[in-house]
Image (cartoon, helix red, strand yellow):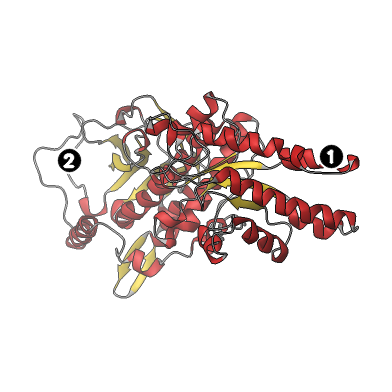
Amino acid sequence: MSIFDNIRLTNETFKLDIDRMRRGWYSDKYFENINRMLIALSKEGYTYSGEHHNLPAGVSAENISVGDIEVEMQWFTRRVGTTVIVGVDKSLEMLRHCTGYWENERFIETADKLEVWAVQDGDVTESPDGNPMNVQPVIRVRGRYRDFALLETPTLGILTRSSRVSSNVYETLTAARGKPVLFFPARFDLHEVQASDGYAYNIAVQRFNMDYSQKLGPFVSTDAQGDWWGGAGGGTVAHAAIASFLGDTAEAMMEFSRILPAHIPRIALVDFNNDSVRDSLRALNALFAKYRELVDAGNKEEAEKYKLYGVRLDTSGTLRDVSVLPLGDPSLDLGVNPRLVFNIRQALDSESENWNLPEDWKEAAREYCHNVKIVVSGGFNPEKIRRFEKLGVPADIYAVGSYLFSNNGATASDFTADVVRVKIHGEWLDMPKVGRRPRDNANMERVW
């Protein structure tokens, strides 16, 4: 369930490998070892017989069946600052379908015997310092521990991965101050994670829109990234396509525009020859000339295919574009830097003045040029985006890749699950390890 539609995703979406998950295939081996031990103790009828328990004074340690111990476990992250929580629905489906035990080759489901509380995907937790004593849990489960012990690893995995991506996206959107952020990290990880990553991105976009009263749409690069929420991939022209046209960016864009349907944005990738101003203007001139020809011929529908939506700058961080005069500082000279973007914007906005046009076309040509957006990519992260925004750089769209998978320092989003209470003689008693305590979260609701 996301907070935006109040509909929880089910296994129809996730398609869990249920049989192997029930057998511990995806679990750290020590959970399987503990599970086997507890099952054996239960069969033996073992009861606690130690001497150094942590039960409160006056609570008897007699006749406690360790093998059948019921616990309260809480799942949480210690990420500092705001965490946009994603992965809850998939975790709940793991609990729903894989809680239980094997009796020979028959799996006995016991999920209905659990008590489960959880937040929704899209909820946030806040932590000023990451202190585990003050965390906000996102899932709480009460039940017989051995029935769901094997699920700690996979539930933590999806919560960590998805919440990391969503939180990094949210931070990036905040840095961009309402400008679109294209989700471009697919090439930096296994293709199997694209659906969950794209879902996390979409949740972050919706959370940002809610918090900042925006109406940004999601922009993913693969169809798989939109699988869980009905989105579809979009994109520009690759460097390989320009190479196929012998380095002729304008010709590549003309054929792209001629062949592909008009609803696909025409965004020219203009850094192939390291002369982004020249190739931007060549593409602009070629597409506008065809656009004008078709409009004058009365074929406005076909003319829409030749509207240049934008240009994308992707200059390598080791190169200085020829339009950027050297200052001797790599941070000011190389890659996609503020001066390059200003150069592009100025060239685009003034180009129509060089066209020999009849009077009735001059304003339309000026508008055509001014409407061309600038997309920047290549090593962008919130810090670089904030610098661009502070300087008023006329970038319209940020394409961000590998940063969105970052999981170190301020972006570390690792989740933990701790037993914090045990049920003894019908009463729930605190039993956390040192440094932990039972915590609550007002956004958690009873799931079952």
Q: Which residue is painted at 72% across and 37% down in the image?
A: 370
Q: Which residue is painted at 67% across and 64% down in the image?
A: 255
In the structure shown, which secondary structural element does the residue marked by tag 1 occupy? helix
128 left or right, relative to 184: left
102 left or right, relative to 289: left
319 left or right, relative to 131: right
Residue in the foreground of this view, choosing between 306 and 28? 306
Q: Find the residue positioned furthest to the left.
A: 51
Q: Which residue bears the numbered disc 2?
A: 61
Q: Amino acid at mark 2?
A: Ala
Residues packed near mark 2 inside 10 Å, few (<14), some (14 to 19) or many (20 plus):
some
Q: Which residue bears the numbered disc 1?
A: 362
Question: Residue 446: horizontal and vertical position, in percent?
Answer: 50, 42
Question: Residue 340: horizontal and vertical position, in percent?
Answer: 53, 36
Q: Can you tell which quarter of the image residue 300 is in?
A: bottom right
Residues packed near mark 1 inside 10 Å, few (<14), some (14 to 19) or many (20 plus):
some
Q: Amino acid at mark 1?
A: Lys
Q: Earlier in the sequence, mark 1 or mark 2?
A: 2
Q: Which residue is painted at 90% across and 58% down in the image?
A: 297
Residue 211: tell me if it is visible: yes
Residue in the foreground of this view, choosing between 253 and 95? 253
